[in-house]
Image (spheres, rainbow, N blue to C red):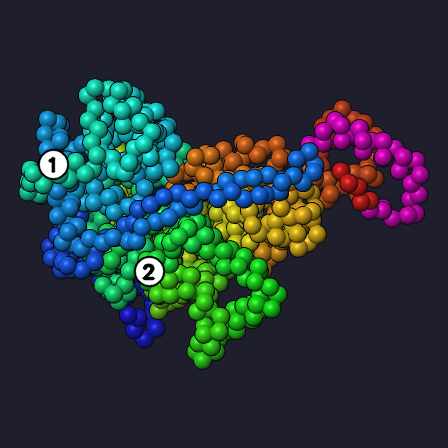
């Protein structure tokens, strides 16, 4: 990594000798460059150039590794569920996987494989005379995914991407909007493709890998006679027999149409050029070269259809890192049998993840610590605090001692070689970052969007701190512009405002949406991110809000719901969750997906039932109340203000996945659907909160007011006719016995 010198700032101000512009900060650039970076090395102008460089420079060194599922092992277990209010023993089948060892290809072999696939695709598409057609890649992250992307770069054919978790509607949109003629997928995704292919008239070629055992290949062929369905192995053999030369692409040619998450509506196609991608690679290399050696190893498991993973892998290809591919469902030893999980088997030195991954790892560690017994838990917690104190006061001896006694065993679960972790795709809570930095290794953060080719800011460990995303990357410049309505001004201390970015890594525009282009860009080429940031004293950037997710409460104050979610999701009881807030309430509520292991353990520890049936626990008022207190304790510890504390929670046992519709394909919340699905339970939980808060006042209310025909409210909450009648009866009784010399009494009523 470009080293920090003499405590220099992470960024410097352009035109620092001129007056500050009105309504915005000065432009800032990375500490290590004067001019913006456009490429990782001279002569690297396209994605294919990156692969050529890697093969030439790293040649016979390990390049890409994959492992296959050898067999599925089923195990039957007995679980306890509440049926008719009684605990009942039931049998449930769990599936585990036996995997093969990793098999490797070198960088030279990878280049040849990309050429063979590219040659085969060109032969199969020889009759297609149309130009600039997108080739869609709809599959799980794998070596084959990357090789198909490289083959398209070899052919100068732009790709479009689709998450493997997309349902039929999302897949149909991705294929039709870009008028895809050819595509790649996995055998187990053909069943989804069968549902939409008849409505995708442009698709003429389908390449797949794996074994199709459900007859899906024949079903696709039966839908339309003009569709070619070919196994990847056949494409490779065809390419070997009909080799061709690369078609040179230009730096400004579109290489990829990558779709945004779609959390706020229909996903938008972001057009990224070869120049955008190689500039992003240049940013990573300029900042991280010290960490990117051929002795390092990277385990890839995030979706390659997401811009973060896409840029990271291409950057590591340039650097010559060995890249191994894993699956989310086989990462740990818990989900495999007769072999090691992907992490333990591959033993990575670098891991890149999103907040959900880090929360899962943190809660997994804490769950094991809790189950180890009181003594080991006390030792772990003491070591955690001791090391955090040692790090704060630069006492390496104490930190080294805690590592030897406690944390080396924790690191062994990641293979024992891990040296750095990188978080992107959203903000991870400070508590989770601090925990993992202590128990594992340093975690740095970054900030970017699909529109900025994942690159806007990266935190150099030389500026290590919690909550900052680092200085601008070398391929982008950043400024903050006043967001007056939300109270963020460039004149604040520290300076705050909406983040605007510009540079060679910024996208070309949205696919077929010039209206969105006009909204997104200023006349002088700045992209409006919609995120709110602040410049820290050391030149790093911190993300403090998102304009679209700022919600005004009843008192007129704004809260940032994504920031609150990052805090509350760090609670061990939470597997996932969504903040619910609006102008009718003084505090937010939250729909909480209960952690399937930690909530039952918490309930059992606190004497709530037997702690086994998750659905039953989620409906137990005592469990819900205790969980609410636990979440608010986490919020208070994180420094949340009173108005940011939760007034109520809805505890659910549902699984939120893209398939269930609660998450986008990029694992982001579908807020509208969540709000609508749980609307009745959210309303009920809020009513209970307001009743508890205002109960005393209602019971001593003038009965004549309760008898009026006009709507009666509790705070800002309308009172139903049934509750009005009940409170009227109590109020009439109290008014008949009320002695004005007595102070109003508080009543505890179980509503």
Q: Residue 49 at x, y = what percent?
A: 13, 50
Of circles 1 and 2, the one toward us is 1
Residue 36 occupies quadrant: bottom left
Residues at marks 1 and 2 touching, judged by CB atoms closer than 8 Å: no
Residue at the image point whose x is 38% and y is 31% from the top: 167
Which region shows up in magenta?
A: 718-746
Structural crowding at the residue carrying mark 2, measured as other residues with C-alpha within 10 Å and reported as few (<14), some (14–19) or many (≥20) = many
Magenta-span inclusion, residue 358: no
The residue that disc 1 covers is 238
Q: Residue 725 at x, y = what percent?
A: 80, 28
The residue that disc 2 covers is 348
Instruction: Say if 366 sits above or below 190 in the image.
Output: below
Residue at the image point whose x is 45% and y is 64% from the top: 410
Report the front residue among 361 and 288: 361
First-in-chain label (1 vs 2): 1
Instruction: Say if 308 sits above or below 243 in the image.
Output: below
Residue at the image point whose x is 35% and y is 69% from the top: 462
Q: Residue 738 at x, y = what percent?
A: 91, 40
Question: Relative to residue 207, is residue 167 drawn left or right?
Answer: right
Q: Secondary structure at mark 1?
A: helix
Q: Residue 583 at x, y = what percent?
A: 58, 39
Structural crowding at the residue carrying mark 1, measured as other residues with C-alpha within 10 Å and reported as few (<14), some (14–19) or many (≥20) = many
Q: Secondary structure at mark 2?
A: loop
Quadrant in the picture for the N terminus: bottom left
């Amino acid at each position: 990594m470009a080293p920090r010198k003499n405590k220099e700032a992470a960024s410097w101000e352009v035109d620092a000798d001129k007056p500050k512009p009105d309504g915005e900060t000065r432009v800032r650039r990375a500490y290590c460059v004067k001019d913006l970076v456009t490429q990782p090395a001279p002569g690297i102008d396209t994605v294919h150039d990156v692969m050529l460089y890697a093969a030439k420079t790293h040649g016979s060194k390990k390049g890409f590794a994959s492992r296959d599922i050898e067999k599925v092992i089923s195990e039957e277990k007995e679980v306890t569920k509440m049926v008719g209010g009684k605990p009942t023993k039931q049998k449930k089948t769990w599936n585990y996987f036996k995997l093969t060892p990793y098999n490797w290809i070198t960088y030279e072999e990878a280049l040849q494989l990309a050429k063979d696939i590219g040659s085969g695709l060109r032969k199969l598409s020889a009759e297609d005379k149309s130009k600039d057609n997108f080739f869609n890649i709809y599959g799980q992250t794998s070596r084959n995914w990357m090789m198909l992307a490289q083959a398209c770069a070899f052919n100068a054919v732009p790709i479009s991407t689709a998450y493997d978790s997309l349902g039929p509607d999302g897949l149909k949109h991705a294929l039709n909007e870009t008028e895809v003629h050819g595509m790649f997928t996995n055998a187990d995704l053909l069943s989804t493709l069968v549902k939409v292919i008849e409505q995708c008239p442009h698709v003429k070629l389908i390449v797949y890998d794996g074994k199709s055992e459900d007859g899906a290949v024949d079903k696709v062929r039966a839908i339309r006679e003009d569709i070619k369905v070919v196994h990847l192995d056949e494409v490779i053999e065809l390419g070997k027999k009909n080799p061709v030369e690369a078609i040179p692409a230009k730096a400004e040619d579109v290489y990829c149409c990558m779709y945004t998450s779609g959390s706020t509506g229909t996903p938008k196609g972001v057009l990224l050029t070869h120049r955008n991608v190689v500039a992003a690679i240049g940013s990573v290399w300029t900042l991280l070269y010290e960490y990117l050696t051929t002795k390092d190893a990277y385990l890839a498991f995030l979706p390659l259809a997401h811009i973060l993973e896409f840029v990271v892998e291409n950057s590591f290809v340039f650097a010559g890192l060995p890249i191994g591919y894993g699956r989310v469902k086989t990462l740990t030893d818990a989900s495999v049998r007769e072999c090691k999980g992907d992490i333990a088997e591959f033993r990575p030195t670098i891991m890149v993840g999103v907040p959900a991954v880090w929360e899962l790892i943190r809660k997994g560690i804490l769950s094991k610590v809790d189950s180890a017994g009181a003594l080991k838990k006390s030792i772990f917690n003491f070591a955690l605090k001791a090391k955090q104190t040692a790090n704060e006061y630069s006492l390496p001896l104490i930190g080294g001692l805690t590592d030897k006694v406690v944390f080396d065993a924790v690191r062994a679960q990641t293979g024992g070689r891990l040296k750095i972790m990188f978080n992107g795709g959203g903000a991870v809570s400070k508590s989770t970052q601090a925990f993992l930095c202590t128990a594992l290794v340093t975690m740095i953060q970054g900030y970017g969007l699909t529109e900025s080719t994942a690159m806007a800011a990266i935190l150099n460990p030389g500026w290590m701190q919690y909550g900052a995303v680092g200085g601008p990357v070398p391929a982008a410049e950043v400024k903050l512009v006043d967001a007056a309505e939300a109270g963020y001004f460039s004149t604040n201390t520290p300076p705050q405002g909406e983040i605007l970015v510009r540079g060679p890594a910024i996208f070309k525009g949205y696919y077929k949406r010039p209206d969105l282009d006009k909204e997104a860009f200023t006349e002088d080429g700045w992209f409006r991110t919609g995120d709110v940031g602040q410049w820290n004293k050391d030149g790093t950037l911190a993300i403090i809000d998102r304009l679209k997710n700022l919600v005004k409460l009843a008192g007129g104050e704004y809260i940032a719901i994504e920031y609150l979610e990052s805090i509350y999701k760090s609670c061990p009881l939470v597997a996932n969750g969504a903040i619910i807030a609006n102008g009718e309430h003084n505090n937010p509520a939250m729909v909480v997906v209960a952690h399937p292991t930690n909530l039952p353990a918490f309930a059992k520890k606190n004497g709530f039932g037997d702690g086994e049936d998750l659905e039953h626990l989620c409906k137990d008022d005592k469990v819900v109340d205790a969980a609410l207190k636990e979440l608010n304790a986490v919020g208070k510890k994180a420094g949340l203000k009173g108005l940011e504390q939760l007034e109520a929670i809805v505890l659910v046992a549902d699984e939120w996945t893209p398939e269930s519709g609660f998450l986008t394909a990029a694992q982001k919340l579908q807020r509208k659907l969540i709000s609508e699905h749980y609307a009745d339970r959210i309303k009920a939980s809020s009513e209970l909160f307001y009743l508890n808060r205002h109960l005393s006042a209602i019971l001593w209310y003038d009965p004549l007011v309760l008898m009026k025909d006009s709507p009666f409210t509790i705070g800002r909450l309308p009172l139903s006719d049934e509750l009005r009648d009940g409170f009227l009866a109590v109020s009439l009784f109290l008014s008949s016995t009320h002695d004005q010399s007595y102070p109003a009494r508080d009543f505890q009523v179980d509503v």
